[in-house]
Image (cartoon, grey):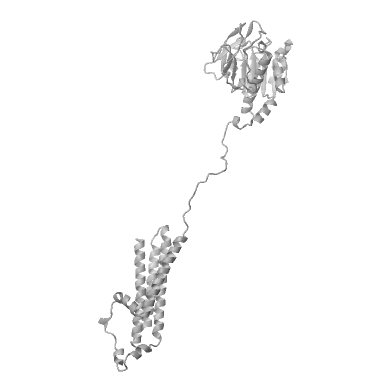
Amino acid sequence: MFKHNSSTSRSRLVIRGITFVILAGFSLYTSGCNLPINFNISYDATAAALSVQATLLVQQQEAQPTAPGVDATQMALDVQSTVQAQQATQLAEQAVQQLAQPTPTVESALPSSTPEILASPAPEEETPEVEETAEETAEETPVGYEATQIAQAVQATLQAQQATQQAAQPTPQVVVNVPSDTPPAPTSTSLAAVTPASDLERQIKSAKILLFEDMSGRGEARYIKEALDAAGYSYTDVGSAVGWFKDRLISSEDWDLIISASEARTKVQGEFFVYLYDHIKKGEAVIIEIWDLDDLKSGKIAPLLLDCGIEVQSDWQNPSIRSIWWLIPEHPLFHEPNDGVSLRDYVRFWRGDVGDLIKLKPGGKATILGGTMADQKTGYATLATCFDGRVIFQTHSTHDYPPANIQRLWQNYVFYTLKNHFLVYP
């Protein structure tokens, strides 16, 4: 609809421009024949009418809602209409100027004896229609020919300007997604993934450790103390002094690791397990060596065993074979920091009651790591871990195994429990 209205408007404007040319030619002809025609008044009225009509056409086009994409074309057509109207006005003015000039050629060509013929008006029936004779008038008169040439030049110029405006319109931007070199924002990970290994090892080596080892009261070699010394740990050693051990436990001190190694057939019992349990609940690591768990299972240690997820299976009395088998050989406890540790060899240090056998409690979350029967994964065990690896229970006796082997295993105990402690409680 918009293109049709625009073509119609251009056609009307061109016809009106040519009409001006015809009027100018006709005026020239009548002037040459000395016909009394008031051309200036007719020309001014016609020009004014065309100007008003062009203005109304522009206002009508502006009043119609157009899409954003049609604005540029509408503007070009408005400019073209205005230029054509101005060009037609200029052509009419040129015709008036030529009419004002003397026309000796026409007068000399006419005989002097026919002034009345020149003065007589042309018959109305011979006046041709404007639309029918416009092209002929343009061919016969110099003014009409010049107007036609100018109109064609104007139209060619406007078409060139429209093409230039269309080419000058900005092309739509094409958005190309280019992969960014910026690394993605860090996502939330567990503490184990974000703690550098060097920092973790430094924390482990500088850990605050409390050691109770009752074998010092017998004058025997202290395998656990030797293991700590060989690994370069610093620690608070209360030896076999039960009273000192209690004082440290009930004080306001915080520990990274507490070692309670009761092997000398004395009894760390009753209230001590309450204190140890309190430290466990604060996030501290604890290693418990106990040989008489079967006698204490119903006492104050019961809540700790229940929460750990283990229970006593039987007493371990004077066994002929004391080898301990790893039930989960790939577990890190057997590889960090010492690999290849083993308790298959034994030395029979103790006689009679050498410890207890434990098993996984139904629904328990403990991990059974070592036992006396390689094909029993949840029972007949002497080694288990619980509380996310922060707690270890050992129910066999340390001195029943070669020092080199058992000390390397104890170093793994310490490293494993401290590592899990610092990963959760740095």
The x, y position of residue 144, in whole percent, is 36, 78
Q: Position of residue 50 (x, y in %)?
A: 37, 73
Residue at 26% in and 81% down: 126
The mark tally for this picture is: 0
Nearer to us in this view, 132 or 354: 132
Q: Give the residue furthest to the bottom.
A: 113
In this orientation, does residue 53 appear? yes
Question: For the point 52% across and 18% down, which residue is it?
Answer: 363
Question: Is 250 situated left or right of 147 in this image?
Answer: right
Q: Quadrant of the C terminus?
A: top right
178 lies left or right of 206: left
Image quarter (top left, top right, bottom left or bottom right) of the N terminus:
bottom left
Q: Which of the 4 image quadrants contains residue 419?
A: top right
| Quadrant assignment, res 123 | bottom left
Residue 51 appears anywhere in the view:
no
What residue lies at 35% left-to-right and 75% top-to-bottom? 18
Q: Is residue 299 above or below residue 101?
A: above
Q: Which residue appears farthest toward the right when viewing the image?
A: 219
Q: Position of residue 388 (x, y in %)?
A: 59, 23
325 or 397: nearer the viewer: 325
Is 333 rendered above or below residue 83? above
Q: Quadrant of residue 158?
A: bottom left
